[in-house]
Image: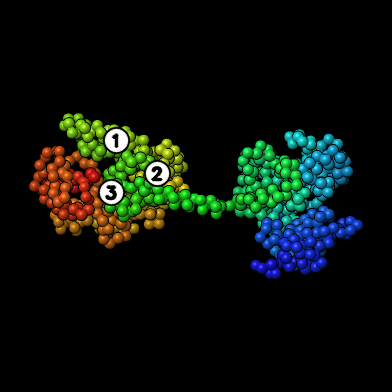
Amino acid sequence: MTEASDPIRQFYTMHLPAGRLEGNILSADCPFCLQKGLDAPGKIIVYLNKDGFFHGYFRCLNRCVPGGFPLWFTRLAGIDPVLAPGFDPDREPFLLAAGYPVQNINTEIKNYQDRMTPEILARFAQAGVSAAALSEMRIGFNGRYLVYPYVQADGNCYAARCVFPGKAADFFWHGDERLFPERFQLFNVQDIERCENGSLFLCEGEDNLLTLKQLGFPGVAVPDCQALEAVDPDRFAFIDTLFIAMVNTAESETSARGLAARIGYKVRLFNWPGGLSRNYSLWQLARDKDRGFRSVVSTMISASRAFSPFASPKREEIRFFDNLARETGDEYGALCSGFARLDTALEGIHGINVIGGAPKVGKSSFMIQIASEMARKGIPVLYYDFENGRQRIYQRTLSRLSRLSTQRIRMKDWSAPERQRYEQACRDFKKMLFSFRVINDRKLTPEIMRRHIDFIRHETRSAYTVVVIDSLHKLPFKDLSERRSGIDAWLRQFESIRDELQVSFLVISELTRGLEGSYKETPHLGVFKGSGDIEYSADNAMVLFPDWEQMEAASSAATCSGWWPAGSTAPAWSAAIPSIIPTGGLWRRKGNRIQESEAGIQPSASSRHFLRAARAIWARIVPRCFFGVFPSRAGKSPKLILDG
């Protein structure tokens, strides 16, 4: 919008034709001074900076009338308000529910004005407040107390606050006690109507407002911060920008933020710099800065922050580049599962990763191994377990670290190498527990989870945390009949925690049976059980899926599982099911050969046949790993185990 097309500028130049424009300020002879009985007109000035908060604000330098914006100008000049920019014929003015009393104290207020003494005037002059400004605001003195009239919207005063000079705590209310309650405690309330479609100040304390009125700014005041709780936000419905300037105390700031939250986006809060004394105020600032007070206030207006649901652009910039820098750092790069192919496919463990699979295919075993390995590297891990129990998770972890079955650990009949492995595993396990926490709380809530995350981040001094959920369908819900909506609600919470607290999730999910009642259906995003939101919430969705056709072709006795990205028609890569299962023997793959390990037990014929089939499938997949088999018994097929 160009200056020539600015409707506010056009409005004032039309009704102040003899005005003179210098920069963004229009000055002319005041059309209201003679109407108010002054001998000669003073100057009226209008601020026409369309980028400023007070664009369209006018005031008379003689203070013959209170200043305001175009709609107030039309009322004073008797102009049809339709001609004023921003006029809305359907607007209803704010009205208090209670009517005003019949009698007022206007005459008393006038008498108090006439009793102002040179000493009182000198007190105000120390903060730059002139006698003319006091007269405009109808401030009086009863011989002992300053009298601040709380004139209501109808132009009459029914109650006044009497304050001992220099002792804010020494005050009382005078007038009709029906107007003493806090909802009537808004000093200079008429300025709200005068500033329709414009900007306004809200101050704590009448004296602080007087310093702004001396500069020509419009505003209202409350006697103290407690009165803000009773302020009706609807009073400011037609104000475009509300500046709130409070006294420098934590209580005042809290009250101001409470009011700002009720009013919304139009509020801009004044912020005091650090190092100022408690209760520092605009009154003290005016005394300290003297002639520089106007410049300081202008700076505070420019620096004031909008009370917005959004972070400031500067804050967003800092946050973005800080996160970007962290993502290029070692700590972010260390968020890996330890499975090279998996980490390559996912680019590490970041975001929300949902892992599905049929019952008993090794989902928990795989997650325990990933979680404990990450914790061994010092990455804080919270394992929310609703499946196995803390003791079983610890036993599996110790068994994997020592490469001894849980049965062997209980027997303690070890060879020297086994004892050495066990003792080293115990040392690693104890060190790992500092970063690895298993939680079995059946009353878990998102708030409790956030506290757990905050604690372990503080404890480990880490910017990142990994959270494992075992499993999604056993998280606590208020009502089992609302399980689906409860799962979706948890996923929404995971998204929020991921974004706010830099948390990575590994979430185990159950699968839905296929048309034939089995789990052989090719994985896709619809196979996850009980939630339609996984496809939207998950950064990665995977299924632990047996490759039946490939394995049946290799050996009718062998079973192998691989990871398939959900929604894919062919496996992108495969990985064995990590598991800790008591084995009859362990063999290490070396090149294309399988060598017997320390166990010294010869595999059976069926086991050898199985290992030959497994070797052909896994040769290109797992560069170094341990294979184990069940000894064949009762006609059962051996199973492949990976403990990498």
Q: Earlier in the sequence, mark 1 or mark 2?
A: 1
Residue at point 65% right, 52% down?
Answer: 302
Image quadrant holding the C terminus, namely top left
Q: Around disc 3, counting alpha carbons within 10 Å, would you say few (fewer than 14), some (14 to 19), or many (20 or more)?
A: few
The percent coordinates of residue 373 (x first, y second) are 30, 42
Residue at point 26% right, 35% down?
Answer: 425
Q: Earlier in the sequence, mark 3 or mark 1?
A: 3
Residue type marked 1: Asp
Label 1 secondary element: helix
Residue type marked 3: Phe
- The alpha-carbon separation of the residues under discs 2 and 3 comes to 19 Å
Residue at point 78% right, 56% down?
Answer: 59
Disc 3: which residue: 339
The quarter of the picture where residue 378 lies is top left
Residue type marked 2: Thr
The percent coordinates of residue 581 (x first, y second) are 21, 41
Disc 2: which residue: 465
Label 3 secondary element: loop
Disc 1: which residue: 428
- The alpha-carbon separation of the residues under discs 3 and 1 comes to 19 Å
Q: Around disc 2, counting alpha carbons within 10 Å, would you say few (fewer than 14), some (14 to 19), or many (20 or more)?
A: many
Residue at point 70% right, 63% down?
Answer: 86
Q: Earlier in the sequence, mark 2 or mark 3?
A: 3
Is the residue under label 2 in contact with that under label 1 (CB below 8 Å)?
A: no
Q: Can you name the residue that lies furthest to the bottom here?
A: 4
Image quadrant holding the N terminus, namely bottom right
498 vs 606, left or right, is: right
Tell me the tag on residue 573: none
Judge by depth and name the residue closer to the eye, 472 or 96. Answer: 472
Q: Mark 1 or mark 2: which is in front?
A: 1
The quarter of the picture where residue 524 lies is bottom left
